[in-house]
Image (spheres, rainbow, N blue to C red):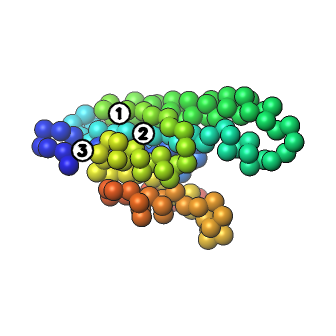
Amino acid sequence: MATLEEKQVMVVGIDDSQHSTYALEWTFDHFFTPPLASNSPFKVVVVHAKTPATSVVASLAEPGIAEVLPQVKSDLKKIAARDIEKAKEICIIKSVSDVIFEVVEGDPRNVLCEAVEKHHASVLVVGSHGYGAIKRAVLGSVSDYCVHNARCTVMIVKRPKMP
């Protein structure tokens, strides 16, 4: 746990979805509003979990698919870079400056829980994709996993349904 002189750490998981962008913006709007933005009690660690290219290629299981591995790696790297740039822009717009950005390869569930441990975070923020029961059962729920396995408070930010 942080001493009074140290800021607590808040890990925010992002991906290429509108749900994670909304979660990041909502968090900054509610925990870092001016004049608190520059004097917030939190240091923020924005984490993007990059899917390993070998996982994507292996899931296709087609003959000759290994030849596309370099392109898949390149595409995943570009997506991660774009997501981090978007998060940096949001930080600038919201006047949040005490931020670390990380791209970590691996399953988002494990990456986020490991980031909590690494940074001794007191809060983990994740967006909710709003999957139904079937999709959640097939894909797995990052937020559900984190609620049960992260060693800190987990805040799930749900994006309102648009009409």
For this orientation, the residue located farthest to the right is 63
Please name the amino acid that badge 2 sits on: Val
- Vertical arrangement, residue 162 with respect to residue 13, above or below: below
**Left or right of 130 in this view: 115:** left
Q: Give how far across and how far down residue 120 sits, in percent.
A: 29, 45
Looking at marks 3 and 2 on the same chain, the residue that comes earlier in the sequence is marked by 3
Residue 43 is at least partly visible in this image = yes
Q: Give how far across and how far down residue 20 sits, in percent.
A: 51, 48
- Vertical arrangement, residue 151 with respect to residue 56, above or below: below
For this orientation, the residue located farthest to the bottom is 133
Q: Secondary structure at mark 1?
A: strand
**Label 3 crowding class (10 Å Cα cut-off): few <14, some 14-19, many 20+?**
many
Looking at marks 2 and 1 on the same chain, the residue that comes earlier in the sequence is marked by 2
Q: Are the residues tagged 2 and 1 within 8 Å (C-beta)?
A: yes
Please name the amino acid that badge 1 sits on: Val
> Residue 141 or 29: which is nearer the viewer?
141
Q: Secondary structure at mark 2?
A: strand
> Residue 54 or 102: which is nearer the viewer?
54
**Label number found at residue 8:** 3
Q: Secondary structure at mark 3?
A: strand
**Label 2 crowding class (10 Å Cα cut-off): few <14, some 14-19, many 20+?**
many
Q: Are the residues tagged 1 and 3 within 8 Å (C-beta)?
A: no
In the picture of the structure, the residue carrying the numbered disc 2 is 46
**Left or right of 118 in this view: 42:** left
> Residue 30 or 42: which is nearer the viewer?
42
Residue appearing at x 63%, y 60% in the figure: 139
In the picture of the structure, the residue carrying the numbered disc 1 is 99
Q: Quadrant of residue 154?
A: bottom left
